[in-house]
Amino acid sequence: MTGENRRSRTVPRTRPARSRRLEAARSPGDVGAFLSRLHVQATRGIPRAQFFAQVAQMLLEFSGCDWIELRHREAAEEGYRCQMSRGDPMPFRFEREPRPAEEGVPAPGGPDAVEILCGMVAERRFDPALSCFTPRGSFWTGDVEEVHDSVAPPRGTPLPVLGPDFGFRSLAIIPLTVGSENTGLLEMRNSARGCFTRADMRRYEQAAASLGVALSHQRARWALG
């Protein structure tokens, strides 16, 4: 058989393993599975710090992010804040924090760029026409270095640049709401670019809505001791 008569065979192209890993890390997991696990944790009646640790771990696995922070207001004078990250000698941090004199979710740490954004989300002080905010009031970007020119806090205060020193390229800040009340914030960071999309944000907001309700129910339990 001559070379001209041989049939050519097309070998399907496969994506490199690194590309597949990045795609998996950039997409949120199954929302139904996350909500099921959240329901289990919310019915266990476990102490506050343990509950936050379990939820933070679930969020880290669900999102594929490198860093998670959860803030929750429990009373007029105080709130709680936890952080969890990958590859950290102290992967989980949990602390009580006093609520600032002004309204809003506790947001200590000074007027840096992320804290300004957290304040904008917590207090709903932003232009909804900006593409980096969702209709539900979440902030998101797949590249922090491209967003500072398009966002400005109220009263004309310039937003500090989220540049290379920030250490992460993708950022999302989602309010935790119960009814019309904003009771907390979920902040997610990833070192890779393009880790959040508009479709992803809808799934994260669905998870955050259930998380806000679960935390409110837990708050009532913890108040009873």
Image (tube, rainbow, N blue to C red):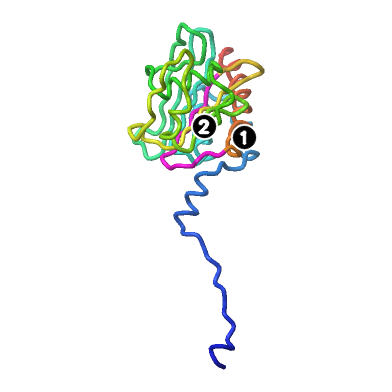
In three-dimensional space, the C-alpha distance between marks 2 and 1, rounded to whole angstroms, equals 11 Å
- Give the labeled residue for mark 1: 202
Q: Which three-letter amino acid code belongs to the residue tagged 2?
A: Trp
Q: Is residue 164 above or below residue 124?
A: below
Looking at the rendered structure, the secondary structure element under dot 2 is strand
Residue 180 is tagged as none
The answer to whether any part of residue 43 appears in the image is no
Question: Mark 2: few, some, or many residues within 10 Å (few <14, many ≥20)?
Answer: many
**Residue 6 or residue 49, whichever sits in front:** 6
Expressed as whole percent of the image width and height from the top left, the position of residue 137 reads 58, 24
Rendered residue at 39%/17% (across/down): 111
Residue farthest to the top?
101
Rendered residue at 57%/86% (across/down): 6
From which residue to which does the magenta span run? 184-197
Q: Is residue 17 above or below residue 65?
A: below
Residue 140 is tagged as 2
Expressed as whole percent of the image width and height from the top left, the position of residue 80 reads 48, 18
**Residue 107 or residue 81, whichever sits in front:** 107
Front label number (2 vs 1): 2
The N terminus appears in which quarter of the rendering? bottom right
Expressed as whole percent of the image width and height from the top left, the position of residue 184 reads 54, 20
Is residue 188 rendered magenta in the image? yes
